[in-house]
Amino acid sequence: MKKLVIVTGLFLLVALVSLLIISRNNRNRDLTDILKDGRLTVLINSGEHGFTRDSLKVNGFQYEVIKKYADELGVELVILHEPDHEQGNDELLKGDCDVIVSLQPFVADSTLDVVSLVPLIETNLMLVQRTDSSGKRSVTTQYELDAKAITVTKASPYKGLIQNLSDDLAIDPQVLEAEYLNLDALVNAVAQGKIEYAVCPGHLVTRLAGSYPTVDMTLPLTFHLQLGWTIRKSSVVLQDNLNSFLSNFVGTAEYWTLYNSYFVN
């Protein structure tokens, strides 16, 4: 019996050490490992515009860009879903994925373990509000948002930007997190009068406006908002390689054709 306990203990110890080694290796995963494995694993927000899945295929603006990069590397693209922005960052740091392919505000803080890649889209953040029967909106300037409640999706990356209005404009809007899983559900809640105000990235306004004629999305809250993907700071080679790819792709005729097909036309 004593021998069995010792053997079991040694087995558990070896298993624990193995898990720690695997976990450490995952956290240090870089381009060399991706090429060796033949897989690029990306984490997406399944409720975000940019990835759409039907019975036959996956498509979307962000999907087509990251698929182009994976094809250039000659590796398989593996897609994981995570709707929670904060949880996604944790999974990235643990090495469960290589890149978070979800449009998030550019962060220049070099002290963070997760860093922003070259921005994929430059846009602004727009206020979402209902209009009355004559098409008039209740808020016409940013200053009128003082003490107003603005609702965002759970763990929204835009929460901090709204809170910054307090410093920039000397107003104090309330930011409420709701359980809405995606932007469409949030805008629909404004249209139905369930919530009063929300936010929407400017590059999606044209696409959403046709579906919600009683909703106004013309008041900007921020300007020159840069949105892009995030990566582990430790993945130095992958970061340089993917940044080079994005720098050479963003702004090209192919980029604008793709952009217009999803956000304008």
Image (cartoon, rainbow, N blue to C red):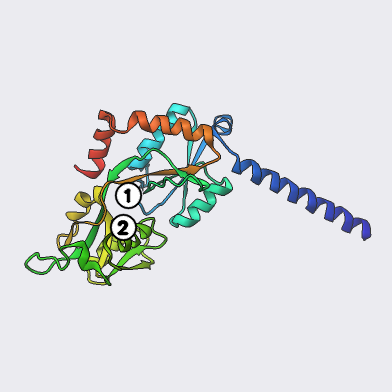
Image location (x, y in percent) of residue 163: 35, 62
Placement of the N terminus among the 4 image quadrants = bottom right
Q: Which residue is more in the foreground, 203 or 74?
A: 203
200 to 224, vertically: above or below = below
What is the CA distance from the residue labelled 2 to the residue labelled 1?
8 Å
Q: What residue is shown at x 42% (from left), y 45% (from top)?
A: 108
Residue at x-position 54% and y-position 37%: 235
Residue 79 visible in this rendered orientation of the protein = no
Q: Camera-side residue: 57 or 229?
A: 229
Q: Position of residue 237 (x, y in %)?
A: 52, 32
**Amino acid identity at mark 1:** His
* Mark 1 surroundings within 10 Å by alpha-carbon count, few (fewer than 14), some (14 through 19), many (20 or more): some
Q: Are marks 2 and 1 in contact (CB under 8 Å)?
A: yes
Amino acid type of the residue that numbered disc 2 sits on in the rendered structure: Leu
41 relative to 66 in the view: left or right: right
**Residue 263 quadrant:** top left
Within-10-Å neighbours for mark 2: few <14, some 14–19, many 20+: many
Disc 1 on helix, strand or loop?
loop
Q: Is residue 218 above or below residue 239?
A: below
Report which residue position mark 2 lands on. Answer: 183
Check the picture and name the quadrant holding the C terminus: top left
Residue 137: percent from left, percent from top: 13, 65
- SS type, badge 2: helix
- Residue 172 picture location, percent across and down: 30, 68
Residue 254 against residue 187 in the figure, above or below: above
> Label 1 belongs to which residue?
49
Q: State which tag comes first along the sequence, 2 or 1.
A: 1
Q: Residue at x 93, y 60 (%)?
A: 2
Q: Which residue occupies 39% across, 66% down?
A: 179
